[in-house]
Amino acid sequence: MKTVLILVGKTVNKHFVAGINDYTERIGHYMPFIIETIPELKNTKNLSEDQQKEMEGDLIMKQIQPSDTVVLLDEHGAEYRSIEYAKWLQKKQNTARRLVFVIGGPYGFAQKIYDRCNEKISLSKMTFSHQMVRLIFVEQLYRACTIIKGEPYHHE
Ligand SMILES: C[S@@+](CC[C@H](N)C(=O)[O-])C[C@H]1O[C@@H](n2cnc3c(N)ncnc32)[C@H](O)[C@@H]1O
């Protein structure tokens, strides 16, 4: 199974970039994992928040294939403990061809993205910035990979 993470906008903070690169490399030892970054349309053409979400939504849709299993990172999504999340991921490894996670832009997702998704996952009931949540997500994905392999990274 290929796993893809779609992001809106380049990661700005160099410390986040370093952390994301570190976990991306680690995840790559467990499964094929790539990050696709679409442009954030902030400050272009004086777009309203809704127009920005719509246009970013069109760019996200272009990255999605019909057979993809699409999982949105969303604070209103299902919440898992890390071990439950690892079990969820293992099931997906057995059933999905391409597992595509999407993190929204600063204003979240356009309705068309909610309509297309298969599932929504929350990392907390609190809202993280679209820049910070990507680092938290890749750490959790790495953690799940180590749990599946029975490796001693995770301690309850
Ligand atoms: C600043 S948030 C957008 C908040 C927006 N009000 C909304 O309703 O989605 C930017 C993106 O970060 C991700 N995000 C933020 N907090 C999250 C959380 N607790 N769990 C999962 N994803 C989260 C989501 O993908 C969201 O689209």
Image (cartoon, rainbow, N blue to C red):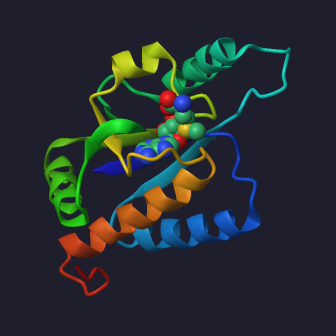
Residue at the front extreme of this rendering: 126
* Above or below, comparing residue 51 to residue 117 in the picture: above
Which of the 4 image quadrants contains residue 54? top right
Q: Is residue 97 above or below residue 13?
A: above
- Using the rendered image of the protein, determine whether residue 139 is visible from the camera's viewpoint: yes
**Residue at coordinates 53% horizontally, 53% vertically from top-left?**
134
* In the displayed structure image, the side of residue 61 where residue 68 appears, left or right: left
Where is residue 109? Give x, y as percent: 51, 25
For the C terminus, the quadrant is bottom left
Up-down: is 64 above or below 12? above
32 vs 118, left or right, is right
Residue at 71% x, 33% y is: 40
Residue 150 coordinates in the image, percent (x, y):
18, 80
> Residue 155 location in percent, x, y?
26, 83
Q: Residue at x 39, y 26 (%)?
A: 65
Q: In the drawing, does residue 96 fall left or right of residue 16?
A: left
Vertically, is 84 above or below 54?
below
Q: Residue at x 35, y 49 (%)?
A: 2
Residue 102: horizontal and vertical position, in percent? 46, 38
- Tell me if residue 72 can be seen: no
Residue 56, picture quadrant: top right
Quadrant housing residue 8: top right
**Number of residue marks:** 0
Q: Is residue 129 left or right of residue 29?
A: right
